[in-house]
Image (cartoon, rainbow, N blue to C red):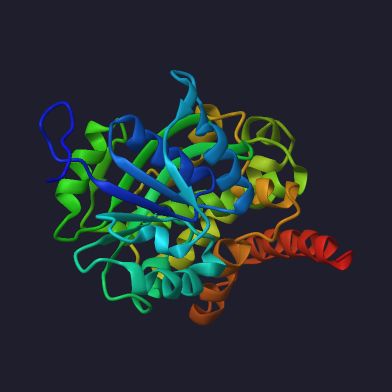
Amino acid sequence: MAEKLAGGEVLMKVAVMGAGAVGCYFGAMLARAGHDVTLIARPQHVEAISLRGLTFESRSFNGTVAVRATSEASGVEGADIVLFCVKSADTESAGRSIAPFLKPDATVLCLQNGVDNAERVQATIKQIAVPSVVYVATEMAGPGHVKHHGRGELIIGTSPASADIARRFSDAAIPTAVSDNVMSDLWAKLITNCAYNAISAVAQLPYGAMLKVKGVSDVIDNAIDECLAVAHAAGISIPANVKQAVFALAEAVPGQYSSTAQDLARGKLTEIDYLNGYVVKKGAELGIATPTNLTLYVMVKLREAHLTAGR
């Protein structure tokens, strides 16, 4: 018989595929709520977590969380829910690696940057892949150590399991809403990433500090306008207040570095091809000029070229 939580509800078995900062945060929150969590992560994180548990640092909690950890894709075996958190460039290969181990009624939530990951992973697995939008400021502060800076909510697409998942996640202090227009929500998040990620990465500055530099707000404004033009040409409806919401982010989490900045700081390649690069590619297909996004994209690609030149 499945174990039950204190309130009598059956616990969920959750696997996190690609447990970096985002995956470790949501995995920790679910584990703290009593759910059975397995993190599938890089070896250095697995070793640290196996020795002492997952170190979880936030404004309301600072300690360790008991979770299982492995580097093997087979860690998803038996999971009711798989949080799919790999980098966008690894979507297809990671999908193929977990496909043999997914149970028939598992639900895969794609907690990734970009707008087309659910479609791409869906092609590699038999289960439903649910597109999801993540709003959380977090980072890996060291092996097996996740640090939370703010927010932590999800918007998930519709599926037979979505309403139940949203209720259970919300009960675990992860505010989760179900959207029947998740593509609009994904594009709103993409616009936010296109506004912040490249600038934070090239400058190696957090959001609050970078907005204080003269001209940065104008660059962000131009990048947003280009994204909106491409979205409208593609038939995507974007919330009217998206620009206001983007600029409000720097006030909400002023100390946060973009995921692109964190990747470059660690000597890793980024997801810029699926952010500003995606807007540039889509704009070219639709005949929409995107010079600001192209510039931001090229700046990050130059930094990546610098990283790989010495390898």
Query: Is 278 left, or right, of 300 in this rendering?
Result: left
Residue in the image at 47% along x and 67% along y: 230
Q: Residue at x 12, y 46 (%)?
A: 1
Residue 306: give x, y in percent of width and height. 85, 62
In the rendered image, the residue lying farthest to the right is 310
Q: Position of residue 18 (x, y in %)?
A: 49, 56
Query: Is residue 282 visible in the rendered structure shown here?
Result: yes
Residue nearest the observer in this picture, 104 or 227: 104
Placement of 169 over or under 202, stated as above or below: above
Residue found at x 45% / y 20%: 61
Residue 70 is situated, as x and y percent measured from the top left of the image, at: 49, 53
Report whether residue 196 is seen: no
Residue 161 sits in quarter: bottom left
When the figure is inspected, residue 288 is found, relative to residue 109, above or below; the finding is below
Query: Is 102 on the left-hand or right-hand side of 311?
Result: left
Report the number of numbered marks: 0
Pick the residue in front: 242 or 46.
Answer: 46
Measured from the top left, where is residue 103 in percent x and y?
25, 66
Q: Nearer the viewer, residue 193 or 56?
A: 56
Q: Which image quarter is the C terminus in?
A: bottom right
Residue 292, relative to residue 245: is it above or below?
Answer: below
